C-alpha cells in the first residue's frame, strides 16, 4: 500500500493517524512525504518498505534520527527527489497525467541515483530537454487541518497550506483529521475563503482529533512541542531509552491515552 502523508517536516503532520498505523498490523508500506516524525516513527516500527521523499527533518533538529538510522543501514528502499520534483509527481497524479516536465533536478545527482527517471524534449522550437517526473499515485492520503466540517471541507489557519490538496488529489482514498469540526457556516469565522484548501470532494473521511498533530506544530492552535521532540530525539539514540519511550507513549490503546500521557508528563 502506498500512503501519502501531508504536512511538512515537523509541521501539521497527521500524527494521530500515524499513531493509529503504529497500533495496526499494517506493514510493507510505501510512504510518500515531505517527511518529519511521521516517517521516523514508521521506520522505527518497521512499517516502511519504500520511502519516496524530498527531505526528512524535525526542523529545529535537522536530521530525523530514526530515518537516518534506516537510511544508513539500508533497511528501507528509497527514492530521494528534489522537493519540486515530488510536488510535480503529486500534481501529475492529481491531474491524471502520466508525468509532468520540469527543470527541477537537472544538473544534480538526482538523475544519477534515480536512473528510472527519464528526460523528454520539448516539442516546440526551443527543443529544451526536461525531466519527466512520473505521476505519484497514492492508495491513501492522510492530512491534518485546523478546522473542518462534517462533509469534509478542510481549512488551514497557519501560514502555509503545504501540499495537502495535491496529496488528496493524487490518492484513491483520502482521510483528514482536524483540530475541530465546526458547522459549515462557521468555516469563515476564523479565516478567509482562501484558507478552505480542502474541498469535500477530495475527502472520504474526516476525524476530529484535538492535538492530533502533536508533537509537530499546528499554528495558531499550538506550536511544536519542542521539549517533547527533544525527548523523542534523545530516546532515539539509545535502544533502552527508546523502549521506555515506546512503552510510555506509543504502546497505548488509543489516541486519548496518548494525549493523557503527554499531559501527565508536562
Image: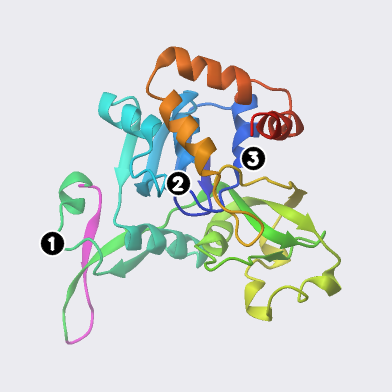
| Of callouts 3 and 2, the N-terminal one | 3
Would residue 132 be seen by someone viewing this image from the given angle? yes
Is 260 on the left-hand or right-hand side of 37?
right
**Residue found at the far top of this picture:** 240
Q: Earlier in the sequence, mark 3 or mark 1?
A: 3
Q: Residues within 10 Å of mark 2 (few under 14, many from 20)?
A: many
Calculate the distance from the C-alpha at mark 2 to the C-alpha at mark 1: 24 Å
Query: Which residue is denoted by mark 1 in the rendering?
Result: 107
Decide whether the magenta segment is chiefly helix, strand or loop: loop
Q: What is the span of residues highlighted in magenta in the rendered image?
A: 115-125
The one of 130 and 124 positioned closer to us in this rendering:
130
Q: Nearer the viewer, mark 3 or mark 1?
A: 3
- The residue at 64%/34% (across/down) is 266
**Disc 3/disc 1 C-alpha distance (Å):** 38 Å
Mark 3 vs 1: CB contact within 8 A: no
Check disc 3: other Cα within 10 Å, few if <14, some if 14-19, many if 20+: many
Q: Residue at x 67, y 72 (%)?
A: 196
Q: How is the image coloured?
A: rainbow
Q: Is residue 253 magenta?
A: no
Q: What residue did someone put label 2 on?
A: 32
Horizontal and vertical percent position of residue 179: 72, 53
| Residue appearing at x 24%, y 69% in the figure | 103
Q: Which residue is mark 3?
A: 17
Tell me, yes or no, whether the two marked residues, 3 and 2, touch with CB atoms within 8 Å: no
- Residue farthest bottom in this picture: 125
Which quadrant of the view contains residue 43? top left
Amino acid at each position: 500500500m502506498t500512503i501519502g502523508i501531508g504536512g511538512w517536516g515537523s509541521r501539521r503532520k497527521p500524527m494521530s493517524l500515524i499513531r493509529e498505523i503504529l497500533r495496526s498490523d499494517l506493514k510493507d508500506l510505501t510512504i510518500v512525504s515531505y517527511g518529519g516524525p511521521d516517517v521516523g516513527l514508521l521506520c522505527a516500527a518497521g512499517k516502511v518498505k519504500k520511502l519516496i521523499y524530498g527531505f526528512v527533518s524535525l526542523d529545529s533538529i535537522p536530521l530525523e534520527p530514526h530515518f537516518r538510522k534506516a537510511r544508513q543501514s539500508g533497511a528501507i528502499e528509497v527514492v530521494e527527489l528534489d522537493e519540486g520534483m515530488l510536488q510535480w509527481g503529486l500534481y501529475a497524479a492529481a491531474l491524471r497525467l502520466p508525468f509532468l516536465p520540469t527543470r527541477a533536478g537537472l544538473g544534480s545527482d538526482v538523475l544519477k541515483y534515480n536512473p528510472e527517471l527519464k528526460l523528454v524534449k520539448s516539442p516546440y522550437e526551443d527543443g529544451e530537454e526536461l525531466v519527466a517526473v512520473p505521476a505519484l499515485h497514492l492508495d491513501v492520503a492522510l492530512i491534518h487541518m485546523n478546522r473542518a466540517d462534517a462533509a469534509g471541507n478542510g481549512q488551514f489557519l497557519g501560514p502555509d497550506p503545504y501540499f495537502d490538496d495535491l496529496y488528496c488529489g493524487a490518492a484513491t482514498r483520502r482521510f483528514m483529521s482536524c483540530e475541530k469540526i465546526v458547522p459549515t457556516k462557521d468555516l469563515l469565522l476564523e479565516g478567509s475563503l482562501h484558507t478552505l484548501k480542502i474541498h469535500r470532494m477530495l475527502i472520504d473521511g474526516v476525524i476530529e482529533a484535538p492535538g492530533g498533530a502533536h508533537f509537530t506544530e499546528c499554528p495558531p492552535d499550538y506550536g511544536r512541542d519542542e521539549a517533547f521532540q527533544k525527548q523523542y530525539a534523545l530516546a532515539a539514540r539509545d535502544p533502552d531509552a527508546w523502549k521506555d519511550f515506546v512503552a510510555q507513549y506509543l504502546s497505548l490503546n488509543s489516541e486519548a491515552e496518548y494525549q493523557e500521557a503527554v499531559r501527565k508528563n508536562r
